[in-house]
Image (cartoon, coloured by chain):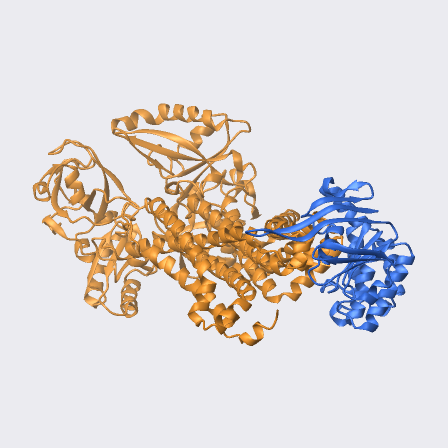
Chain colours: A blue, B orange
Amino acid sequence: MIQLKEIDKYIESRFQRIFILKGINLTIQEGEFLTLMGPSGAGKSTLLNILGLLDEDYDGEYLFGNKNIRTMKERERSSLHKSEFGYIFQAYHLIDELTVYENIETPLLYRKVASAERKSIIADLLDRFNMVAKKDLFPAQLSGGQQQLVGIARAIAGRPRLLLADEPTGNLHSGQAKEIMEVFQELHQEGTTIIQATHARENADYGTRLINLLDGRIESDEKI
Amino acid sequence: MWKNYLKVSFRNLRKRKLYTGINLLGLTIAIVSFLAICLYIQHEWSYDKMYADHERIYKINQEFVSQGESRLVSSTPSSLIPTLKDEVPEVEEGTLLFDLSIFSSVMIDAGEGSQEEKKFAFADENFFDVFDFQILAGNPSRILSEPNQLVLTASTANRYFGGYTQAVGKALKVDGKEYQVSGVMEDFPSNSHMEFDFLASFLSHRHGKDPEWSPSNYYTYVKLRDGVDPVSFHSKLDQIVDKYLGSELAQYGYSTAFYLQPVAQIHLGDQSLNVIKPGSDIRYIYIFGVVALLLMAIGIINYVNLATAEATERNKEVGLRKTLGAGRSQLFGQFVSESMLLTLGAAGLSILVLNLIVPKFKEISGVPLNLDLFATPLGILAMLVFVAVVGLLAGMYPSVILSGMQPIKALTNKTKMGGGAWVRKSLVMFQFFVSIGLLMATLIVKNQLDYMQDVSLGYEKEQIIAVNYHYSMRNSMETLKGEMLRSGAAISVARAADMPIHIKAGYKVFPGGDNQKELMITGYSVDPDILETIQLDLVAGENFSEADPTRAELEDEHSRNPILMNEAAVQQLGWSSEEAIGKVVNMGFSENSVIKGVVKDFYFNSLHHELGPLVIFNDPDQSNVLLIKLPAGNPSAHLATLEGIWDRMLSDRPFNPVFVDQAYDQLYRSEQKAGLIFGIFSAIAIFIACMGLFGLVSYVAMRRTREIGIRKVLGATQQNVLSVLAGDFLKLLGIASVFSIGFGVWFFQAWIADFANRISLNFWPFILAIGLVFLLAMLTIGYRSWKVYSLNPAKTLKSD
């Protein structure tokens, strides 16, 4: 599904290049649940951003399916982005001015999903995460775990093939974290490809593959 | 999708109250000013366009040429209209009007004592065929066709008879002569160049039955047939001149021609031809239009500045939306809908505010603004288009900036607003440029007005009143003067043809006697007391004496006629003041005019004009103004005394005094109006700009709170903090000042060129304008920096 070839990412400083990622070669198959681990500054988030098309400032080749991302037109990349990718953040990043319902609705609006279909998708999601009663609350009125559930609901509302999660449980206590990881597992079983970056070893156990990053290089790559 | 945009926009605006408040206030003030000026311009532009076929209706003006000097006047002979109708088939209709008000007022008596009325004119029977004013009562085709018929306007009919149906058929006495009310017409609309309360049939006028080619005292209007080219029509007018007027005028060394003026161009055209009602200078209309656009631009710039500054705060939201799949156009829609919503709100508020200020506006400018225009379908459409354009202009730049951010940078808040900074800076600079520029213009106009107020005119205008009297009262005047002087309520009294502020009568010096030159000269008919009353100085010779004959006492054109001239006149005839005494000149009506004295030059016209040559005639019978110098002190007691004497001696005319200095100020009405409008709008511009500045500084302060906290910990004083915040803005203000000085100098030269007598370029308006705006800007920034400074660094530093 994804193939990275010789990915370099660096910052040009006055006297030298500081590499954040160096010579990353990586192939990810459809249906994998991959975990990126490593200490702070190892390049987990950077790699995730590159994978998620949020960062276009790097050297090397990125093939998605059989398409080369680097040579794609802005419009194609944007439509690929819309149809295939979902994102989950450590800090949830819900839109404060929107209710739970509206937050989940936003990606559907951007995908121009018809109103009736939108309603049924959101209803299903609210139902699935037991949030029907909270649909008219604003993010500030929810606990962290609940906010992250909304974040997940929002990420999967557009039915992406690839779900990217950057420290999804980083701000949660262990009980909530477990709940979130179980949701991930469920999604994985339904066929979604998931790539997560995390500090916590126990989260990796939910996945199928573990990659350890150190100083911008892949140190180990193992199946679980 | 739009529903969602609007919902989110609304919540965003509600959440950020300072931001929304500043923007809403700024936009509302800008839109109110803009719309008010637009309505004003629309009103000025709509003059005389309400008549059916107005584009075929023309006024005819007459030109007199003598010795290469040409003078265009707005009146024509009374024979012109009947001749045109008989001999020129291109003329469909035509009418003649005689405006009595420029000569004198009339006394109207409807049986309950007489009242003085000023807006009285004679019109011939075709008046309503040319101007399709509505006739409310009476038979339209017969209401001006007989002698002694009188048409009233609706409000006049109300005033005298309490309604227009009962007015018809009633009798009225005009200066003792009986008239019958034959009809009632609608009031003249405020956007007509004519304004009368009474129209009498021209056949009632003493020259009404026998048209003549001289004098040129009548206004002529024609309606040309459809398709007639007005330019080629002038050849027909030339034929008329050749046939009836050419040879006669040639004797006196004149030639003449008639010119068409489209009726809709009277109000904004050459003001010397617009005599019935004061018009407007079209240049001021243009200037106001530019001011309206500038104010609107300042309001929009405020929004752009604040919204781009705010973009820093909204990075996160933008990044997030992008990762959720928002395309550029969708983000653009989101932010533009926010500015549209705000503009719509401001426009709604503006209409409310306009409703409140329209009556006040009418009081100040005399112009009724027609707010109903906004209730017409076209008005609503125009308003919506206006909102869309303003919303788009305001929202476009911030939206492009925001939607163009890279999502990951935006999410992690790493974006510096470096790219937009120079745009924002130039916009702030533009705002201050406009503010300072308008303020400079205001101060320059004020300087010139003050100068005209204080300049030594060469005569006295303080504590002097002028009272109009009727020709028929001339024989009582000497007695009246005596009574007034005896009462002690007057120091000196003189009869004159006009107030000295604006002497109009045109005369000509012909070759003859001791002089071989021709000279166009202004004539002032007075009695000998004028020199004492308005304090004219004699530089040579002496004043008229009792022994000198008045003009009425001259036997023929060879009789010795003593005259006075001003210095400019004798100088142009080639004499020094002393040499001129005793010289004989030919004044046309009197070939043996002897210069008896020379008066020091004084400004007998508005300061727009150069001081020209003047001749003073001993001619009290041509006078119809009594000039009275009051003793010092509160004038009201003296006025009461004088009124008592007047009423005792002349019971049929009211005593209506005008203060000469106030009448003098009236000469500069359009300049005062311009000064006032510049003043109001420069205040508005400065206010909006300062508000925008406040918003910008607030954001800068917020972004730099932490930095300022650190500086404070390191020992920065309040001044240090102020200079950190103010430095950038002061630089912008400095550059704006340089540009506005350039503008100020240009404005000074362009505007002041209109005055023959003017102030010289000095730096005070520039220093004052720049200083004031700097001060206000510093106060704005200072307030903000004080608030940041007073924050506790322990708190501000913890937030990271």
Question: Which residue is more in the foreground, B309 or B667?
Answer: B309
Question: Which residue is more in the foreground, A158 or B135?
Answer: A158
Quadrant of the image occupied by residue B557:
top left
The image position of residue A15, as x and y in percent, is 55, 51
The image position of residue B799, as x and y in percent, is 61, 71
The image position of residue B402, as x and y in percent, is 64, 53
Residue at screen point 52% across, 71% down = B709
Residue B787, compared with residue B604, is above or below; it is below
Question: Which residue is more in the foreground, B443 or B475?
Answer: B443
What is the number of callouts on the image?
0
Is B32 left or right of B244, judged from the image as shown?
right
Quadrant of the image occupied by residue B722:
bottom left
The answer to whether residue B706 shows anywhere in this view is: yes
Q: Residue furthest front?
A: A219
Is B320 left or right of B198, judged from the image as shown?
right
The image position of residue B182, as x and y in percent, is 51, 47
Quadrant of the image occupied by residue B164:
bottom right
The answer to whether residue B369 shows anywhere in this view is: no
Is B371 left or right of A30, judged from the image as shown?
left
Can you say which quadrant of the picture contains the C terminus of chain B?
bottom right
